[in-house]
Image (tube, helix red, strand yellow):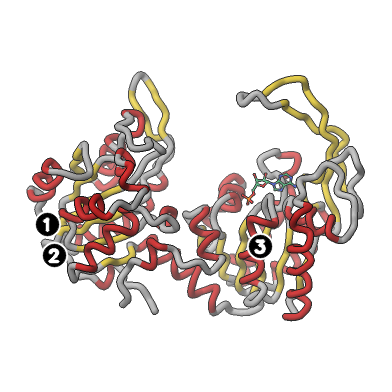
Amino acid sequence: MAKLTVRDLDVKGKRVFIRVDYNVPLEEKDGKMVITDATRIVETLPTLKLLIEKGARIVLTAHLGRPKGKREATMSLAPVAVKLSELLGKPVGFIDDCIGEKVEAGVAALKDGELVLLENVRYYNEEEANDPAFATKLAKVADVYVNDAFGAAHRAHASTEGVARVVTARGGKAAAGLLMERELKFLGDELDHPVRPFVVILGGAKVSDKIKVIDRLLEKADTILIGGAMAYTFKLAHGEKTGKSLVEPDHKQTALDAETKAKKLGVNFQLPTDTIIGTPVDTGKLNKKGKPVYDFVDIKTIKGEIPDQAEGFSIGEETAANYAKIIASAKTILWNGPMGMFEDPRFAAGTNAVALAVVEATQKNGAKSIIGGGDSVKALNKAKLGDKVTFMSTGGGASLEFLEGTVLPGVAALSEK
Ligand code: AMP
């Protein structure tokens, strides 16, 4: 059943307690904390503008960093209130606590359409423990609950789950914000009923991280394209050499089972046919964590087995071209995980070629392209293509769990339509 959203709510004069994701990057400059990327704040503006228009009294709550139950000045949300006020073009109050009398007084003073941001909820250990008494204290200023923090919805914390339970138990409503609504639409409905052909591209480091997603999508997809280091565990399972590549020998059977299931279901399951390899050499230097820093020499594209001294770092040109051709025929595309170690420009070409193919299928063929969060979002943004796909998930772990078919506690706690 569909979840209630902010569009469905009548909130005039009501106190709307909204959980947002303001976990923004901060840097210290001249003794002050400065926000270096305000994307997450900007993304909440449509929901906030809608609530302001509807005459809600808005109470914003969020976490920042991992203060582990202590008041950590560098993790205060105070700079976020200033930035949000600038972006909205109207005052945003800030209360230096998230529970207690100060909060109750501050919220009582709000008029329709006004906002206040509460201090970091993780200043209390009870937040992550989802302590019911703490959730009840937070809920003291909530007539209605809204969750717009998809990236935190896989955690059952007091502000992501507990408050929703308290509010609904009192007969109040718990609804999805517009950001959350889009996540549920694209990662949920659109993939449950995809326009075909439905092509899934899966990459990243480990088979073990993605196996549940592979398993579930095998039941829905027409084609699955595998890339990234994950492909080498399949190679290993086929009895091929993988040199020094990142592999999971314990997951050889997992890989073989996925291939068997694909065959049984008639899914076109493709593995890379060529690989970009390099030979690691110790530079004698240590990184910040005291680990040896390696460089890579003798970088080249190979087919077949990876030599003993070498390591695989990306899909090769042939694979990228083949994958691009398949992507061009898709009407729905889901992409999760890079095709190689794209952070290093020497190994980024395969990931970039796939990114470009996804963008072209979207722009030229009207395919719906859904980017399932995490590093594939980073790769698209790095290639400056982020705004040319249909949807990019804002979650990392939450997106992956949602794609696995797991019911996220922050979503489960929301009211049905
Ligand atoms: P994931 O979080 O599982 O999507 O994995 C993303 C990470 O996997 C990125 O940091 C990539 O650099 C890394 N990765 C992808 N392919 C390779 C590869 N062939 N060798 C080493 N790391 C890789």
Observer-side mark, 3 or 2, equals: 3
Q: Picture coordinates of residue 168 (x, y %)? A: 24, 68
Observer-side mark, 1 or 3, equals: 3
Quick one: quadrant of the C terminus? bottom left
Residue that mark 2 sits on: 12
Q: Which mark sits nearer the N-terminus, 2 or 1?
A: 2
Q: Which of the labelled discs sits on residue 112, or is there none? A: 1
> Could you say which quadrant of the image residue 180 lies in?
bottom left
Quick one: quadrant of the N terminus? bottom left
Q: Which mark sits nearer the N-terminus, 1 or 3?
A: 1
Distance from Cα at disc 1 to Cα at disc 3: 48 Å
Secondary structure type for disc 1: loop
Secondary structure type for disc 3: helix
Q: Residue at x 80, y 26 (%)?
A: 282
Type of amino acid under label 3: Ile
Distance from Cα at disc 2 to Cα at disc 1: 7 Å
- Answer few, some or many: residues within 10 Å of disc 2's Cα (few below 14, many 20 plus, some between 14 and 19): some
Q: Picture coordinates of residue 35 (x, y %)? A: 38, 35
Q: Picture coordinates of residue 399 (x, y %)? A: 51, 59
Q: Which of the labelled discs sits on residue 32, or is there none? A: none
Badges 3 and 2: C-beta atoms under 8 Å apart?
no
Residue closer to the observer: 356 or 136: 136
Type of amino acid under label 1: Asp
296 up-or-down from 351: above or below? above
Q: Residue at x 60, y 72 (%)?
A: 332
Residue 333 falls left or right of residue 353: left
Residue that mark 3 sits on: 211
> Could you say which quadrant of the image residue 272 lies in?
bottom right
| Label 1, ligand 1: CB separation under 8 Å | no
Type of amino acid under label 2: Lys
